[in-house]
Amino acid sequence: MPAHPSPQAESRDAVDVLIVGAGPTGLALAVDLVRRGVCTLVVEAADRPFSGSRGLSLQPRTQEVLDDIGVMDALREAGRPLPPMQTWRNGRRDGEWRLVERDPQAPVTRYPVQWLVPQWRTQQILQDRLLALGGAVEYGTRLTALHQTDQLVQAELTQTDGSRRTLNMPYLVGADGGRSTVREALGIKMKTEGGALHAAVVADVRVDGLDHDHWHTWPDGPGGELLLCPLPGTDQFQLTTPVGDEEGDPCPQRVRELIATRTHLPATAVTDVQWTSSYKPRTALAERFRDKRVFIAGDAAHVHPPGGGQGLNIGVHDAYNLGWKLGQVLHDHAPDTLLDSYDAERRPAAHDVLDISAQLYRLGRKPEGSRVRARHRGRLTLLPVHYRDSPLSTEAREQLTHTVLQAGDRAPDLTFTPADAAAHDTPRQLFELLAGPHFTLLAVDSAPPPVPPAVRTLQVTGGTLAQALGTGLFLIRPDGHIGLATQNPAHLERYYTKVGLAAG
C-alpha cells in the first residue's frame, strides 16, 4: 500500500515511470519527475522505510542538487557540519583535527562544507517532499518479473501478502541497491575494480560518557580502529569498525563487545543498540546504465566503499541527470536518443570517484592521512564533475584553453545583477535564478535572441559571472550544466531539437 494517501495513489497503476527502490536515489528521482508533471510510482520491497544512519555525508554539489528539488532547507535544519575529529589513546584525548579541510581553490557555492544527516532522515525528507507533490510510494512491493518491448516495459509486482499485479509503463528505473533485482533481470554485469577491502560493522548506538561535539576515533584498538560519529538531531552515534570477513550482522551484545575491547569505554556505557549491519566493501561499476527502456542508478549501477562519502551522493546525481531527460522525452517530444546521454555522462563520473573512495577507505579516518585527503578534497566535493565529452555538450567557441569554463561544465554559481534589475536591486547568485525544472539561456555581454517558451532568458552585463564565462550565449541545462556555449545564435536551434525544445 502507499506510504500515505496521495492523489496519485488512486491511479498508481497508470504511470509513466516506475522506480524500483525507495532509497535516496529513487526518491530524489521521483521528486524531480513529479515536479515535472511525470506520473511516477516508487515501489520498495521492504515493509517500511529504512531506519539506519548509513549514508551520512552530503557533499557540496549534492546540496546544490537537493536545494533545487526543494528539500535542502529541511536537511539543513536536520543536520550539521562535520564535527572535528577527536583521537583517543589510553583512555585520554590525544588531539583534535579536521577530517576535511576547506579547499581554497574550490568553485564558489552556497554550500561549501559537507553536511551530516542520517540517511533515514534524508529519505524521510525526500519522501515527504514527494508526497506533498502528489507522488506515491508503496512499501512491501517487490519486482518479481520484468519484460520489455520497443514500446513499453512490463513489470510484475508482488506484495507482502502474496498478491500480484502487472504494470505497463514507458520507462522503469532500478534504484534498488547493490543487489539490484532490476540489474539482475537485465543481465547487466558488475565489473569489480581495485583490490579487496576489509569487512566492517556499522551500528547506531547510544553511548554514555562521550560528548556530541566531536567525531571520536580510537585508532589503536585490537582488531582495528573504531569510530563513533554523533548523529545530528538524535542522542545516538554511528559506530563503524572493521571485523573479520566471516562475521554477519552483529547482535547488540557483539556491538557492546567491540566498543569495550577497542575503546576505553565499558560495555555498560552502551545503553541502546538501535540498528546494526555488516558489509564487505567493494568497488564495482555496471557495464552499462541503460537497457532499452530500463535504467539503473545509484548502488544498482556502481558500488562505492564508504571512505570517500560518495555512494549516496553519486546516486542522487544519477537521479538529477536522468530526471530532466525523462521529462523531456515524455512531455516535450525530445528524441529517445537523448536518454543515451545518461550512460555516456554518468558512467564516467561514477568511475572517476571509485578509485578515490577505495583509497580513502583503506586509509581510514586518521590524521596522518591528511595529505592524501587534501590531494582529493576538491574532487570529493563533486563540484568539478563535468560532461565535456558528452554528446549533449556543444562547445562552438574557438581557441579556448582547457581551464576556461566550457560546455559540459557545471555553471558557475557567481553573483551578478540581471540586466533588467532595478537600480536598488542587490546582486543575486546564479543558481537562485536557475532554480526549477527548466532550461536557461544566459546572454553574456550579448543581445539575447528569441527563445522557446520553455526557456528562461537572463542577460548578463559585466561582473564576475561575465568574466568567468566570456562573451556569448550559454544554454544551461536543468541540472545546472552548460549544454551549449556559442557566439552564434544559429547554433541554438540545432540544440533545441536535440533536447526537445524546438517549436512544433
Image (cartoon, helix red, strand yellow):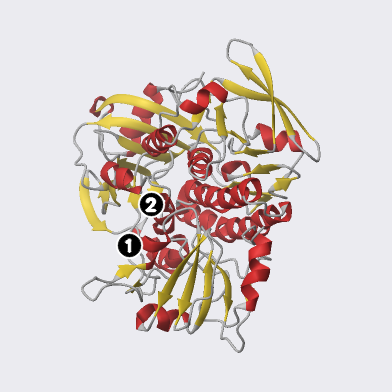
The quadrant holding residue 201 is top left
Residue 373 x/y as whole percent: 42, 63
Residue 411 x/y as whole percent: 47, 69
> Which mark is on residue 110?
1
Residue tagged 2? 67
Q: Amino acid at mark 1?
A: Arg
Front residue of 193/179: it is 179
Taking the spot 49% from the left edge, 62% from the top edge, the residue there is 480
Badge 2 element = helix
What is the residue that sits farthest to the bottom in this orientation? 399
Residue 45 in view, yes or no? no
Residue 433 in view, yes or no? yes
The quadrant holding residue 371 is bottom left
Residue 205 vertical position relative to residue 502 in the rendered view, above or below: above
Residue 284 x/y as whole percent: 64, 48
Front residue of 453/226: it is 453
Taking the spot 24% from the left edge, 45% from the top edge, the residue there is 90
Q: CA distance from mark 2 to mark 1?
A: 10 Å
10 Å neighbourhood of mark 1: few (<14), some, or many (≥20)? Answer: few
Residue 25 vertical position relative to residue 168 in the rendered view, above or below: below
Q: With 378 as the anchor, is 347 left or right in this view?
A: right
**Mark 2 vs 1: CB contact within 8 A:** yes
Residue 296 x/y as whole percent: 64, 43
Q: With 343 as the anchor, is 251 left or right in this view?
A: left
Front residue of 143/137: it is 137
Q: With 396 as the anchor, is 47 left or right in this view?
A: left
10 Å neighbourhood of mark 2: few (<14), some, or many (≥20)? Answer: many
Taking the spot 52% from the left edge, 73% from the top edge, the residue there is 474
